[in-house]
Image (cartoon, helix red, strand yellow):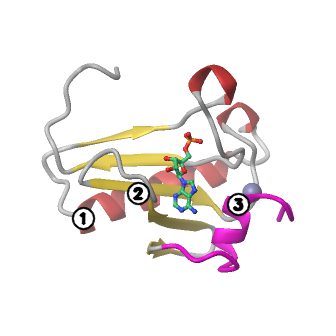
Amino acid sequence: MLSDCLFCKIAAGEIPSEKVYEDGSVYAFRDINPQAPVHILVIPKQHVDSAAEISEENSALAARCFEAIAKIAAAEGLGSGFRVITNVGEDAGQTVRHLHFHLLGGVKMGEGLL
Ligand code: AMP
Ligand code: ZN
């Protein structure tokens, strides 16, 4: 855990969040500034800066996140579809330097973002 990392603190329960899912390696909570009717952040509990730091050594953490995403999407009733986004670095507008996957759904999304 990084002592100055917002999402490490959220995963550890030191900062409150609206939790939707948790297991041994993943924590998921509602985004404080939702961009869709369902907007959930899925993070590994272990600190990784971003998707640019995923390697052979830690890629299981990303796999665990996607296993959680499938479960959460089903639980949130997103059977008709959803979008997963991860921002990396300055050009993508990453504001929190702890790997997170935005799970967006509950609305018909256009092709604007992708
Ligand atoms: P990104 O811009 O990809 O780094 O996304 C960071 C996301 O974290 C943004 O969508 C913020 O709204 C969200 N966020 C920031 N602080 C909190 C918080 N305390 N609880 C929930 N979501 C947060
Ligand atoms: Zn962190």
Vertical position of residue 38 compared to residue 113: above or below: below
Q: Which residue is the site of mark 2?
A: 40
**Which residue carries the number 3 mark?**
6
Packing grade of label 2 (10 A; few <14, some 14-19, many >=20) is many
Residue drawn at x 68%, y 28% is: 89
Disc 2 is placed on an element classified as strand
To which quarter of the image does residue 7 belong?
Answer: bottom right
Question: In the rendered structure, does residue 4 fall within the stretch colored magenta?
Answer: yes
Rounded to the nearest angstrom, the CA distance separating label 2 from label 1 is: 10 Å
| Number of the front mark, 3 or 1 | 3
- Where is residue 69? Give x, y as percent: 40, 56
Q: Quadrant of the N terminus?
A: bottom right
Q: Which quadrant of the render holds ligand 2?
A: bottom right
Quadrant in the rendering for residue 25:
bottom right
Residue 72 rendering spot, x and y as whole percentages? 34, 63
Task: Report whether the residue tagged 3 is closer than 8 Å to ligand 1.
Answer: yes
Give the residues in magenta. 1-17
> Dot 1 corresponds to which residue?
76
- Near mark 1 (Cα within 10 A), the count class, few <14, some 14-19 or many ≥20, is few
| Separation of marks 3 and 2 at Cα, in angstroms | 16 Å
Residue sitting at x 48%, y 55% = 41
Q: Is disc 1 placed on a helix, strand or loop?
A: loop
Image check: 110 left or right of 94? Answer: left
Hey, what amino acid is under mark 1? Answer: Glu
Q: Nearer the viewer, residue 84 or 2?
A: 2
Q: Are marks 2 and 1 in contact (CB under 8 Å)?
A: yes
Marks 3 and 1 sit apart, C-alpha to C-alpha, by 25 Å
- Of tags 2 and 1, which is closer to the observer? 2
At label 2, the amino acid type is Ile
**Badge 3 element:** helix
Image quarter hosting the C terminus: top left
Query: Looking at the image, do the residues carrying marks 3 and 1 touch, with CB atoms under 8 Å apart?
Result: no
